[in-house]
Amino acid sequence: MPDPGLALEVLALLAAVAFVAGFVDAIAGGGGLITVPALLIAGVPPVQAIATNKLQGTFGVLSSTAAFLRAGAIERRLVLPLAGAAFAGGMFGAVVATLAPVGLLRMIIPFILITIAIYMLLTPKFGDGDAKSRLSPLAFAGSVGVTIGLYDGVFGPGAGTFYLIGLILLCGFPLLKATAHTKLMNAASNLGALGFFLAAGHVLIIPGLAMGVAAAAGAWIGARTGLKHGARLIRPLVILVSLAMALRLLLDPAHPFAGAIRGTLGF
């Protein structure tokens, strides 16, 4: 499908939004929470908005992954197994997206995100590096990593948070290390899904590239900020972004509880 005729000022605004999203995503995930609604507001059809978001988001997570790699926060021996598992999951997830129970995912994911936020809020030492390792990184990659990658290809919101929590709870990674390896896996599952969306012709190249360059700049700065401030910045941002994603999904008209929640909140 050809790119819609977006005016230059609209592309500039989308790029600015992508810069902010890239910064936030590099630290806490959830950048798509910002960029997908922006694309929809700009008049991009839903399928193209999701596919184009994979393109711009891939720039962002590759940029933050490079920053973490350069800083030595990612174990190089884990790059291929973790990235390979997430890539395979993301590609397969995009292929089967039309067959997946997206309605069920849309209903339950907000409550999982809220649970994660509450758990992190009530567990101040979560991710401080004292968690017991229950799986080796290779076992995690071949099981949980593939599964979350598949989810990222099928639906997406919260995938980075799920990688993060899994690496902490199952592999015993401290928060900053888990964040760095999450970016690696997020980049890989994004690339896997993006390959399918490009082949299917759903990606809008010009908006995706404009946003991608801005997202890469924001993600690089975000990763450096996360490295500098560590858990004291990452933890509250993960909690806030998880709650924001949950609220955004709960207020989506497609969510079965959206009407009741909007009425309760007076929207």
Image (cartoon, rainbow, N blue to C red):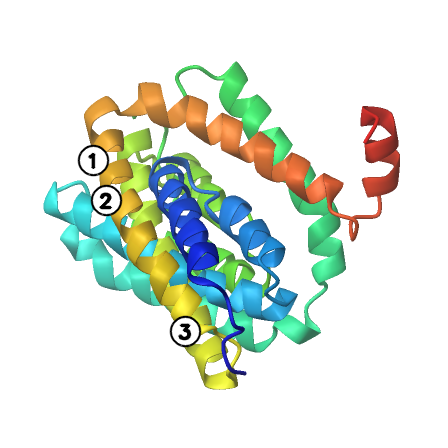
Do labels 1 and 2 touch, CB within 8 Å? yes
Secondary element at image label 3: helix
Point 52% across, 27% down: residue: 240
Secondary element at image label 2: helix
Point 55% across, 57% down: residue: 39
Q: Amino acid at mark 3?
A: Ile
Res 210 quadrant in image: bottom left
96 versus 171 height, above or below: below
Q: CA distance from mark 1 to mark 3?
A: 28 Å
Specify the quadrant that holds the C terminus.
top right
- Classify 10 Å Cα crowding around label 3: few (below 14), some (14-19), many (20 and above): some
At which x and y percent is residue 13?
A: 44, 50
Which residue position holds label 1? 224
- Classify 10 Å Cα crowding around label 1: few (below 14), some (14-19), many (20 and above): some
Q: Earlier in the sequence, mark 3 or mark 2?
A: 3
122 versus 209 height, above or below: above
Res 180 quadrant in image: top left
Do labels 1 and 3 touch, CB within 8 Å? no
Point 38% across, 54% down: residue: 186
Q: Earlier in the sequence, mark 1 or mark 3?
A: 3
Which residue position holds label 3? 205
On the rendered structure, is 147 left or right of 70?
A: right
At which x and y percent is residue 265?
A: 80, 25
- Which of labels 1 and 3 is toward the front? 3
How many numbered marks, from 0 up? 3
Please tell me which residue lies in front, 164 or 195: 195
Q: Amino acid at mark 1?
A: Arg
Please tell me which residue lies in front, 77 or 116: 116
Q: CA distance from mark 1 to mark 2?
A: 6 Å
At which x and y percent is residue 104?
A: 75, 55
Q: CA distance from mark 3 to mark 2?
A: 22 Å
Please tell me which residue lies in front, 122 or 134: 122
